[in-house]
Image: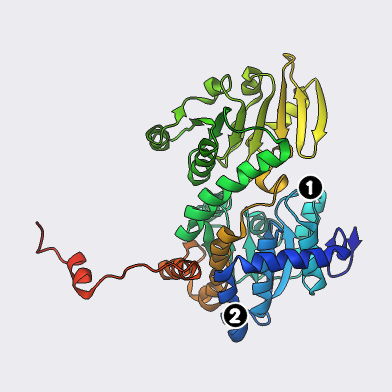
Amino acid sequence: MDDHMDYKIKDIKLAGQGERQLEWAEAHMPTLMLIRRELGMSKPLKGLRIAMLLHVTKETGVLARTMAAAGGEVYLGGSNPLSTQDDIAAALASEGMHVFAWKGQTDKDYNDNIKTILGSKPDLIMDDGADLHAATHQKYKNLRIMGGTEETTTGITRLKAMEEEKVLRYPVIAVNNAYTKYLFDNRYGTGQSGVDGVIRATNIMISGKVAVVAGYGWVGRGVAMRLHGMGARVIVTEVNPFRALEAIMDGYGVMTMADAAKEGDLFITATGDMNVVTYDNMLRMKDGAIMANVGHFDVEIDMRTLNKKAKRTKQIRDHLKEFELSNGRKVYVLAEGRLVNLGAAEGHPSEVMDLSFANQALAAVNIVKNGKSLGNKVYNVPEETDERIAKLKLKSMGISIDALTKEQKEYMTQWRYGT
């Protein structure tokens, strides 16, 4: 472990490898690179400290470099104990950024790193899951924060609760609510990377398996779509009747988790809530059933009860652990019940994070420019920003679309002419 005044990472010697990874990501994130060039000239973050608690991947590295190019002093920590790519942390630290992250950190390490990052007295917070926002409000109430951003559905749920309780102390832009974030990152990004994590951890055949997807939000839709496309028979569990109907109309089976537990070979949770798969559900599962999570926190599979009641455990391979239940059956958990796409794989492809992190960068600048005029609330990304990012992405792909004529625009805004 390299413990330095300005950073704490696994090994600074990994910087060269990380640099090559960052070059690859930058080549596949043209939208964010265009925004970086613009911000590099105007320097809207000059003199500001930016506290970032995100998954330290090569894509996050491109965002961190963009914040630095915009004039910000970056303090970066990992938002998940298993998601940090140590070579990326080393590359960023070698460039002078304050990085406090390594793969496999303990809960104490995680909280110590948050303490170090907030000890820098940041001006702006960029978060993934709202742990940094929560710590700011619970333990660092003296900090004068201009505002912040939030990347995930789970984090936004927490921040909205803070807003409703009237304890939120600064404006936050909900990046996750941008169309160019949740329609693509959540559905296509998690859909691909979640299944990628399962395959890397197990090398199982997806085709022919009965796959149970818990939750049919944008993440669950993406996972179900990819599993179905690879030949799995998909069952969806839901608590929302509208989403359950949608899953049926999309061609999937829908049932309760208690019933699905007896049918599934592979279970993937995607709800953002706790105890979605209980120990009682596990006792109903087939011998050899596999469980993974793509929701934000490690609470969707009841790991606490499983660890307590399992007769025996065995580490089969990296990110694949066997649990023998009280009934003698064996079940398997991937990546400790944490995000399987980041714990056992590399997270989302660069092309989709190009959209998400373009939103993050512009949201941060928006807070700096307009934060004083905003109330202490959770705001969506402005529609014009969202649309601009979509247009830039299409342009980078060499795709042109039609534009409304003056006559068409007028027709869409009048009421006199119908059939």
Nearest to the observer: residue 22 or residue 84? 22
Quadrant into which the N terminus falls: bottom right
Q: Position of residue 46 (x, y in %)?
A: 66, 82
Colour option used:
rainbow
Q: Residue 119 sits in which quadrant?
A: bottom right
Nearest to the observer: residue 303 or residue 181? 181
Q: Is 278 placed left or right of 110 in the picture?
A: left
Badge 1 crowding class, 10 Å Cα cut-off, few under 14, some 14 to 19, many 20 or more, is: few
Labels 2 & 1 near each other (Cβ < 8 A): no
Give me the disc on residue 107: 1
Quadrant into which the C terminus falls: bottom left
Q: Is residue 51 visible?
A: no
* Element marked by disc 2: helix
Residue at image position (87%, 65%) is 12
Residue beneath disc 2: 37
Q: Is residue 73 visible?
A: yes
Q: Is 390 placed left or right of 331 in the picture?
A: left
